[in-house]
Amino acid sequence: GDVTVATHSSGATYDFDLDASNNFKLTISAAVELGFSNLDASREGQTGVIYIDNGAITPTWGAEVVFEGGTTLSLTQSAKSLLAYYVLPGGADVLVVADGGHISTGAANKIKQKGEFLTHSLHRAWVLGS
């Protein structure tokens, strides 16, 4: 499928534009608040995957982003993370999920699993409809 690829190196915010794609790859090298744009009732049920290559940054999240169990997701600095999202009923809020695991790439850029993260997230993405 289509993937929107971007790099964030300046500015206070970065929004995943739901008009542009369902799937995103973002490289972060500056402090940022992550959020979503083009949210409305027609987006209800939209799902996708977000791959983040994070520098030494601890990003924050916009007010429209909610988390499983109500605990704000914290991305590990200098790591790669794979997240899934689901636009909640009404289209005003987005649920972002991850199991706290991270992925890394080896010398051949093949993804290596750490913990149970990929198994659970892929299952959740399938259940959520992407």
Image (cartoon, rainbow, N blue to C red):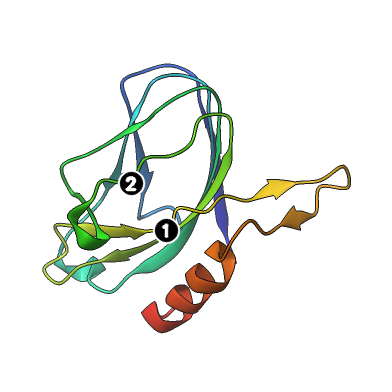
Q: Residue furthest front?
A: 115
Looking at the rendered structure, the kind of residue marked 2 is: Leu
Using the image as rendered, state which of residue 79 and residue 48 is in the foreground: 79
**SS class, disc 1:** loop
Viewer can see residue 125: yes
Determine whether, in the image, residue 39 is placed left or right of residue 117. left
Instruction: Please report the residue visible at 58 percent of the width from the left and 66 percent of the height from the top.
Output: 118
Q: Can you identify the residue that label 1 sits on? A: 98
Using the image as rendered, state which of residue 69 and residue 55 is in the foreground: 69
Q: Can you identify the residue that label 2 sits on? A: 73
Compared to residue 102, the image places residue 115 above or below, namely below
Percent coordinates x, y for residue 40 in the rendering: 17, 60
**SS class, disc 2:** loop
Looking at the rendered structure, the kind of residue marked 1 is: Ala
Q: Residues within 10 Å of mark 1 (few under 14, many from 20)?
A: many
Contact between marks 1 and 2 (CB within 8 A): the answer is yes
Viewer can see residue 24: no
